[in-house]
Image (spheres, rainbow, N blue to C red):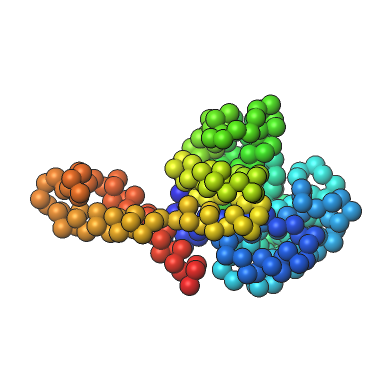
């Protein structure tokens, strides 16, 4: 979990939106997601990419999306659109620029240099998509490559493809990769956002995968349909019971200082439990502020 303070930004639900579809971008202003990825890559046909680039830049710089974290996903390094995408996205100044298939620390440094050359404001972070075997194996060096790197975004569809694996309930074939990305992200102090769930009609399957992602430690989930937002928001937010439990634990610890062993609900309380409880309250407060 990234820093939990007044600056903590909830990323429970991060919705991909095709930047070539102006109606979709308009609709996004009323969707209760925490974040948006205005997509210039997979969701946009080649002949529509120049216009989509202009539309995404205008949307990201408009200020019309309230407290949502607005990002732009550019086309990957080496594509014919990448350089122009980076310039336009940097000048638009979104919360982050999302780059697919980032495979090394050197690529992170290359991307950050290009962003800075294009005039990206200080608040615009780089979000690296982790979706290849080499990226998983080099995840820690990628995560630590630049202070401008703000998040890992798991590209689980590409990862399954690259591994010659299968999409199965529970995601057993890619669990080691997900854990590795999480370990690297936590070691570097950045956010880590889970990949998409493809079957938008399978609500139970989606909610199960959200629960799994939360249990593993992801900050939230990338989404491909507005109908997935509510489920992700609920899954990745502390429940009322968890918030009350956190408050009670912290109070018990404060009340028991100097008295030796402190217990709460029959369990021993140590500093690490208090830190976890404080993190829970910080997340809950940030979500309340976002939804106000």
Where residue 283 appears, x then y in whole percent?
A: 42, 58
- Above or below: residue 167 compared with residue 13: above
Tell whether 39 sits left or right of 214.
Answer: right
Report the residue at 22% width, 59% height from top. Answer: 251
Residue 83 or residue 201, whichever sits in front: 201
The residue at the far top in this view is 164
Instruction: Please tell me in which quadrant of the rendered image residue 30 appears.
Output: bottom right
- Residue 189 visible, this orientation: no
| Residue pictured at 65% horizontal, 45% vertical | 199
Q: Residue at x 30, y 55 (%)?
A: 246
Residue 198, x across and y down, in percent? 66, 44
At horizontal 80% and vertical 53% (from top left) the residue drawn is: 44
Above or below: residue 65 compared with residue 35: below
Name which quarter of the figure residue 79 lies in.
top right
Q: Kindly tell me whether residue 223 is visible in this rendering.
A: yes
Residue 252 is situated, as x and y percent measured from the top left of the image, at: 19, 55
Question: Quick check: 60 left or right of 236?
Answer: right
Q: Position of residue 141 (x, y in %)?
A: 57, 36
Q: Horizontally, is 44 left or right of 10 in the view?
A: right
Residue closer to the observer: 283 or 115: 283
């Amino acid at each position: 979990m990234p820093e939990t303070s007044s600056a903590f930004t909830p990323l429970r639900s991060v919705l991909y939106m095709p930047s070539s579809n102006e109606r979709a971008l308009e609709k996004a202003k009323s969707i209760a997601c925490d974040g948006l990825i205005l997509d210039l890559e997979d969701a946009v046909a080649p002949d529509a990419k120049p216009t989509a680039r202009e539309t995404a830049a205008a949307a990201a710089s408009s200020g019309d999306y309230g407290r949502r974290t607005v990002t732009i996903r550019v086309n990957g390094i080496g594509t014919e659109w990448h350089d122009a995408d980076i310039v336009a996205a940097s000048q638009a100044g979104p919360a982050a620029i999302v780059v697919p298939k980032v495979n090394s620390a050197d690529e992170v440094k290359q991307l950050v240099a290009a962003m800075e050359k294009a005039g990206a404001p200080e608040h615009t972070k780089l979000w690296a998509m982790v979706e290849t075997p080499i990226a998983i194996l080099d995840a820690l060096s990628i995560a630590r490559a630049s202070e401008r790197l703000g998040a890992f975004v798991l590209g689980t569809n590409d990862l399954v493809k690259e591994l010659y694996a299968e999409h199965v309930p529970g995601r057993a074939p890619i669990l080691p990769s997900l854990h590795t990305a999480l370990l690297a992200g936590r070691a570097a102090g950045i956010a880590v956002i889970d990949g998409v769930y493809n079957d938008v009609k399978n609500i139970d399957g989606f909610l199960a995968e959200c629960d799994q992602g939360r249990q593993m430690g992801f900050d939230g989930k990338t989404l491909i349909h507005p109908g997935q937002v509510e489920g992700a928001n609920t899954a990745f937010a502390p429940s009322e019971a968890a918030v009350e439990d956190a408050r009670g634990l912290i109070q018990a610890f404060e009340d028991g200082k100097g008295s030796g062993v402190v217990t709460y609900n029959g369990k021993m309380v140590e500093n690490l439990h208090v830190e976890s409880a404080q993190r829970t309250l910080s997340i809950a407060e940030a979500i309340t502020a976002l939804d106000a």
